[in-house]
Amino acid sequence: MTKAENVIKFYILCNKLKDVVRSGWLTWNIQKERVESVAEHIYSTEMLAIAMKSEYQIDVDIEKVIFMLAIHEIEEIIIGDIEITAADYASKKALGHQAVHQVLKDLIDGEKLEKIILEFDERKTKEAYFAYQCDKLECDLQAKLYDEQGYVTFTNQQDNYEYNSPMAQELIKNGATHFSEIWHATDEKLYTENNEFKEVFLYAKNNDIMPLINNN
């Protein structure tokens, strides 16, 4: 292939992520005409990273983080967004790395890009860990937004493994009335080692966040 053909092929492959729906929202039966796609999730993680760097002045190479987040989900072009209970979830990492190679193999910088994705997966550098925290926090914020916008109820969750889990049922028994309460209870432990992300997470958990866009 020519360089021009490789550029266009890669663009078309990545364009597919606009139509890959985030599986967690399907699990919770989000009652919205169109729920978040993987491409939209990628954009939101990048914007979240910019805001976290701006407000907390965290010592990371933000350009590297943005680059990392831009490509961190390209495996889902091939394998889709695999749910945690899916039969092949245990092999998701291996499947993902194979898919990444398949997508990137024709690019001159393909090997370099694969290494960046492996760095993200291993979470050993400060940029990779920061990007990982952005990836998780974006999900928690989106869950809260769906809740506040009234797109989720407990009345149609009969086949939802998360809703039917012992932890979720215990939370409901103790007064939980919103799905984000269950979602956040699962994720809160992810932020114990990072005070900045923990602060943002706890604010979203304990407050309505939609009114912030009208707060001048």
Image (spheres, grey):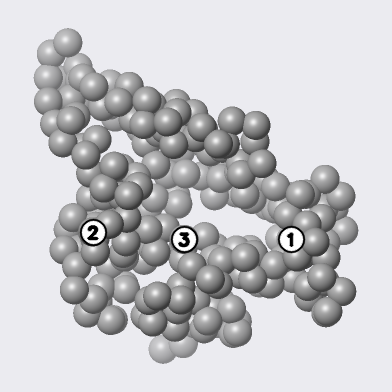
- SS for tag 3? helix
Of the two numbered discs 2 and 3 in the rendering, the one whose residue sits closer to the viewer? 2
| Residue on which the image places disc 1 | 152
Answer with left or right where residue 154 lies relative to residue 83: right
Three-letter amino acid code of the residue under disc 1: Val
Q: Is residue 142 above or below residue 105?
A: below
Residue, x 51% and y 32% (percent of image)? 91
Outermost residue to the bottom:
216
Q: Is residue 150 above or below residue 41?
A: below
Three-letter amino acid code of the residue under disc 2: Thr
Residue, x 71% and y 60% (percent of image)? 151
| Residue on which the image places disc 3 | 136
Answer with left or right where residue 90 lies relative to residue 61: right
Residue 34 seen by the camera: no
| Residue on which the image places disc 2 | 125
Q: CA distance from mark 2 to mark 3?
A: 17 Å
Q: CA distance from mark 2 to mark 1?
A: 37 Å
Q: Quadrant of residue 200?
A: bottom left
Residue 65 seen by the camera: yes
Answer with left or right where residue 214 lies relative to residue 8: right
Q: Sequence order check: which comes first, mark 2 or mark 3?
A: 2
Characterize the local packing of mark 1: few (<14), some (14-19) or many (20 or more) Cα atoms within 10 angstroms.
many
Three-letter amino acid code of the residue under disc 3: Lys
- SS for tag 1? loop
Q: Marks 1 and 3: CB-CB under 8 Å?
A: no
Q: CA distance from mark 1 to mark 3?
A: 20 Å
Residue, x 52% and y 81% (percent of image)? 202
Q: Marks 2 and 3: CB-CB under 8 Å?
A: no
Q: Give residue 114's position: percent from left, percent from top.
A: 24, 35
Answer with left or right where residue 90 lies relative to residue 63: right
